[in-house]
Amino acid sequence: MKHGTDASQHQDSVNSKIQALNRIVAGWCRYYQYTSQATAEFNRIQYRLFWLMGHWLGRKRTTSFRVICIRYKRNETCATSECSLLKLGDEFPTRRYRASVFKPNPYTHQQLIISREELPDEA
């Protein structure tokens, strides 16, 4: 399976490629955002994504990576005048579940004493 920055995928426009990668990576980040140290991992992915996008642009424009960095690098990410790659570490920080999902286990916690209901005498 070929990924979006493969050499054979150079016919797409730069903006559509950035938007497609943003959708894929944002969904992945939202899913893994609640893991431990997600921000650090997202920063590593951001670096790799910038590198892949830069080399894809170099193949598309038939120019060097240095020229691509000069032309497309803005705020530590790859961008055009219309859109930019997401900054994963900034937009998707590590999060923790705040809602308590604790439900007491009847086998490990204090036993509840349930008294039987008194039935009326039959007459």
Image: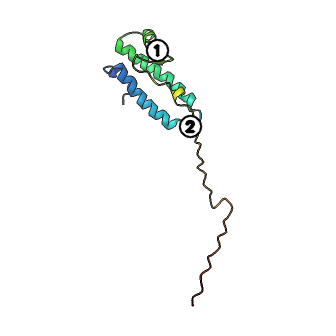
Q: Which residue is mark 2?
A: 35
Which label belongs to residue 65? Answer: none
The CA span between labels 2 and 1 is 29 Å
Q: Count residues near mark 1 (Cα–Cα under 10 Å), then give few for <14, some for 14-19, many for 20+.
A: some
Q: Quadrant of residue 85?
A: top left
Q: The disc labelled 2 sits on which kind of residue?
A: Thr
Whole-percent x, y for residue 4 in the image: 38, 26
Q: Residue furthest bottom?
A: 123
Q: Secondary structure at mark 1?
A: strand
Seen as rendered, the residue at the extreme right is 110
Horizontal side of residue 28 vs 9, given as left or right: right
The answer to whether any part of residue 69 appears in the image is yes
Q: Residue at x 37, y 21 (%)?
A: 15
Q: Position of residue 104 (x, y in %)?
A: 62, 56
- Residue in the foreground of this view, choosing between 43 and 122: 122
Q: Residues within 10 Å of mark 2 (few under 14, many from 20)?
A: few
Name the residue located 63 percent from the left edge and 61 percent from the top edge.
106
Q: Position of residue 17 (x, y in %)?
A: 37, 23
Which residue does the numbered mark 1 point to in the structure image? 73
Quick check: can you spot residue 5?
no
Residue drawn at point x = 39 percent, y = 26 percent: 19
Report the amino acid beneath label 1. Answer: Lys
